[in-house]
């Protein structure tokens, strides 16, 4: 596997060269979500990095509105593309611009967000065209699926092996209005200003989410870092082409050497797991299995789930001491005068009721009612809207 990482300063580039990183991603502030290299310094910095013999990748991973895109395109004319070896893009507009204006420049296509099915990924591969150098896949793909996608796509694949996990992004400024005591629409982030702090959830006990605001908006990260450095042997066996490590948020840059060594010689590091010395909490994410859907059933109110046998419909209206309004939804059953009913409320209560009075929406007495019609029957206390109605066996 080859190794790529991010570089913002020349000392980081020198370290990357020393530990045999294959290529470095250089983030221009205007085009990179977390890049720290100013547009004025970008070319000179690229020259310095190039002298070290490193392969340079231009990072264009921001998502853009049409207005933002038009502004950014003007800046692209000032970039010396001859010194750039490849471009990584995420926005479809950026992809089309590169294909049209830099037809011979290798493309690294970022498909980390919302691209989990093979059909969609193949369409993106076709859209990128002949200059597609590799695809950056999501860390939400479990190991088996990642392995099969690598075989099916037929192009080099990259994933994040170690680094921050982005959970949320908005182009709005959510931090600076509170720090600077200004409204959001009056607060304008600049290239010189960025804000970092930790956030907590009002709806759960979870806290410590890293938050970052810069010129592109506000980002929230997982409290734990993605960490697959102890699984590099498995990644190598599935023929992963490139392992990306992102330690821009870690002060101790020397960990890069340990990470590269683990990727190059995975078996040699099995006796001394790097997870024990990583400076931040870690998680392997979905690598072994994606169980993100196991809670779906628990998110639903089990008391309101239908039991189709003898199911008649739902209570739509309740008038105390007057009536219950029931919408009949069963295709096979009708509600009849004299029926014995079982009513299951959303809070788990069960009550029985004999239909002694039944009227239609015009207030006329009726003996039965069928699907897609409403019947108003005699009231019983303790029943609320959304109560399920069943005919007693």
Image (cartoon, rainbow, N blue to C red):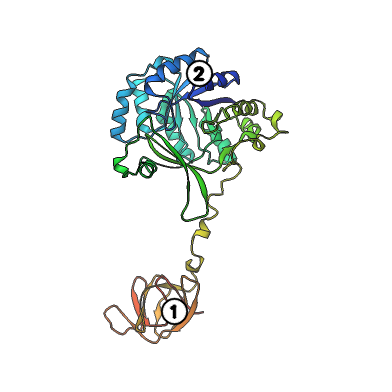
Q: Residue at x 47, y 20 (%)?
A: 56
Vertical position of residue 247 compared to residue 176: above or below: above
Q: Earlier in the sequence, mark 2 or mark 1?
A: 2
Vertical position of residue 59 compared to residue 185: above or below: above
Residue indicated by mark 1: 382
Q: Residue furthest left?
A: 362
Vertical position of residue 158 compared to residue 203: above or below: above
Left or right of residue 320, residue 252 in this image: right
Q: Residue furthest top?
A: 51
Q: Position of residue 10 (x, y in %)?
A: 50, 19
Left or right of residue 375, residue 160 in this image: right
Label 2 Cα neighbours within 10 Å, binned few <14 / some 14-19 / many ≥20: some
In which quadrant of the rendered image does the N terminus lie?
A: top right
Residue indicated by mark 2: 55
In-front residue for pair 285/305: 285
Label 1 Cα neighbours within 10 Å, binned few <14 / some 14-19 / many ≥20: few
Q: Position of residue 147 (x, y in %)?
A: 58, 36
Q: Is disc 2 in contact with disc 1, using a CB cutoff of under 8 Å?
A: no
Spatial CA span between label 2 and label 1 = 71 Å
In-front residue for pair 110/223: 223
Q: Position of residue 63 (x, y in %)?
A: 38, 35
Vertical position of residue 166 compared to residue 334: above or below: above
Q: Residue at x 39, y 24 (%)?
A: 38
Q: Which numbered disc covers residue 243?
A: none
The secondary structure type at the circle numbered 2 is strand
């Amino acid at each position: 596997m080859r190794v790529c990482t991010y570089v913002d300063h020349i000392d980081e580039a020198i370290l990357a060269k020393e530990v045999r990183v294959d290529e470095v991603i250089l983030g221009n502030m205007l085009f990179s979500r977390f890049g720290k290299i100013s547009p004025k310094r970008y070319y000179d910095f690229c020259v310095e990095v190039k002298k070290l013999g490193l392969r340079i990748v231009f990072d264009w991973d921001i998502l853009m509105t049409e207005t933002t895109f038009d502004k950014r395109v003007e800046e692209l004319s000032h970039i010396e593309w001859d010194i750039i070896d490849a471009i990584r893009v995420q926005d479809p507009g950026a992809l089309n611009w590169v294909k049209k204006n830099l037809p011979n420049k290798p493309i690294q296509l970022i498909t980390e967000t919302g691209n989990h099915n093979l059909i969609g990924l193949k369409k993106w591969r076709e859209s990128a065209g002949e200059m597609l150098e590799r695809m950056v896949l999501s860390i939400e793909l479990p190991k088996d699926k990642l392995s099969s996608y690598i075989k099916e796509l037929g192009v080099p694949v990259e994933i994040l092996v170690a680094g921050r996990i982005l959970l949320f992004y908005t182009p709005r400024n959510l931090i600076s209005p509170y720090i600077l005591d200004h409204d959001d629409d009056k607060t304008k982030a600049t290239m010189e200003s960025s804000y970092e702090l930790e956030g907590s959830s009002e709806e759960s006990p979870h806290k410590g989410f890293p938050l970052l605001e810069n010129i592109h908006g506000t980002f929230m990260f997982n409290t734990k870092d993605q960490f697959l450095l102890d699984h590099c042997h498995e990644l190598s066996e599935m023929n992963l082409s490139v392992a990306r490590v992102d330690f821009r948020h870690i002060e101790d840059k020397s960990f890069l050497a340990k990470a590269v060594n683990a990727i190059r010689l995975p078996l040699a590091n099995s006796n001394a797991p790097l997870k024990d010395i990583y400076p931040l909490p870690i998680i392997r994410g979905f690598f072994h299995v994606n169980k993100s859907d196991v809670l779906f059933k628990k998110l639903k109110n089990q008391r309101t789930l239908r039991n189709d046998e003898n199911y008649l419909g739902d209570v739509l209206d309740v008038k105390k001491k007057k009536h219950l309004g029931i919408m009949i939804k069963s295709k096979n059953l009708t509600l009849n005068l004299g029926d014995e009913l079982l009513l299951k409320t959303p809070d788990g209560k069960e009550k029985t009721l004999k239909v002694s009075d039944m009227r239609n929406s015009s207030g006329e007495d009726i003996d039965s009612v069928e699907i897609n019609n409403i019947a108003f029957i005699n009231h019983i206390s303790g029943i609320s809207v959304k109560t399920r109605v069943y005919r007693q066996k």
